[in-house]
Amino acid sequence: MDSLHDSSSSLPDAVERVAASVLGLVARRHAASGVLWRDGVAVGSASLLWRTSRVSLVLPDGERVAGEVRGIDGGTDLAAVVFTSGALPRPERAGDAAPRVGDFVFAVGREPSGLVQASFGHVGAVGGAWRSWRGGRVDRWIRLDGGLHPGFDGAPVADAAGRVIGIASSAFSRHHHGVVLPVATVDRVVDALLAHGHVPHGYIGIAAQPVRAMLDGRSVDGLLVSSVADDGPAARAGLQVADVIVDVGGEPVTSLDALRDRLLAGRQVQLRVARGGQAHQLTLDVAERPAPRRC
């Protein structure tokens, strides 16, 4: 009982430590939570800041300052907001520690009035890297055991010790469960948003589907090209309908996700394709996929 009492007594302190880095984000139509991720950079929910360029940030001391939405990524539901203010503490992070099913976690949000709110629960499911239905690459699957209350999208989620494991989002899980976007994903996306205003995605201009084909007399798995965009990178490289992409840069590709992971905008890649059962090598310059018009 003593250990349970000690844990319960320390929890409010953990909430207070995280709350010292939590900001309220107030746009024209929405109010949400965010967290100081780097000096002068807050992270929030892309869904709630879509088509917003300016926001008002409510600091932990109640002061309001102006912020600029530097970039959003609908694929991971993350947004970066830059602002100028005095020194604020950044939250402690859990690092590379992998959460387990059943771990206690809590989220901390801040209302437009400055009021701090917290929500408590557990990790409901964990898994490896995954790709959202919007095309975002997420380093680890962390699902909460329940949904997110209003105002908690974009809020930090922390373990029992108050170490942040990621950012909360309700945009991706079925059955209304909340999802946690892990620290590694947030760091990678924030880097891209600050540099480009969006996360660049590779584009070669094809439609394809998994297939089993013959290559030099043996059966292989690959991607059957069903269409090629006119004057796209694939067309310029000589890729044709009915070609089967077998590997990219020497790495096999048996799914569209595997192909996307190997296509980095601005890079040149070598494709090995099966054409009429024979191997062909193509050199392709990967372009950047046009930004989506909707989040």
Image (cartoon, helix red, strand yellow):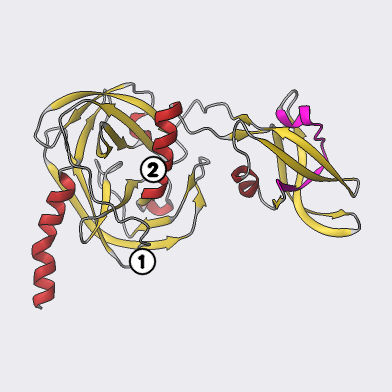
Helix, strand or loop at mark 1? loop
Report how far apart the C-alphas of labels 1 and 2 lie in the structure. Answer: 21 Å
Q: Residue at x 86, y 53 (%)?
A: 215
**Residue 4 in the figure: left or right of residue 175:** left
The residue carrying mark 2 is 187
Q: Residue at x 30, y 42 (%)?
A: 153
Q: What is the span of residues highlighted in magenta in the rendered image?
A: 233-249
Question: 73 or 279: nearer the eye?
Answer: 279
Q: Residue at x 34, y 23 (%)?
A: 52
Closest to the camera, between mark 1 and mark 2, is 2
Residue 8 visible in the current orientation: yes
**Residue 169 in the figure: left or right of residue 152:** right
Question: 119 or 278: nearer the eye?
Answer: 278
Horizontal and vertical percent position of residue 160: 21, 61
Horizontal and vertical percent position of residue 126: 41, 62
Asked if 159 appears above or below 184 in the picture, the reply is: below
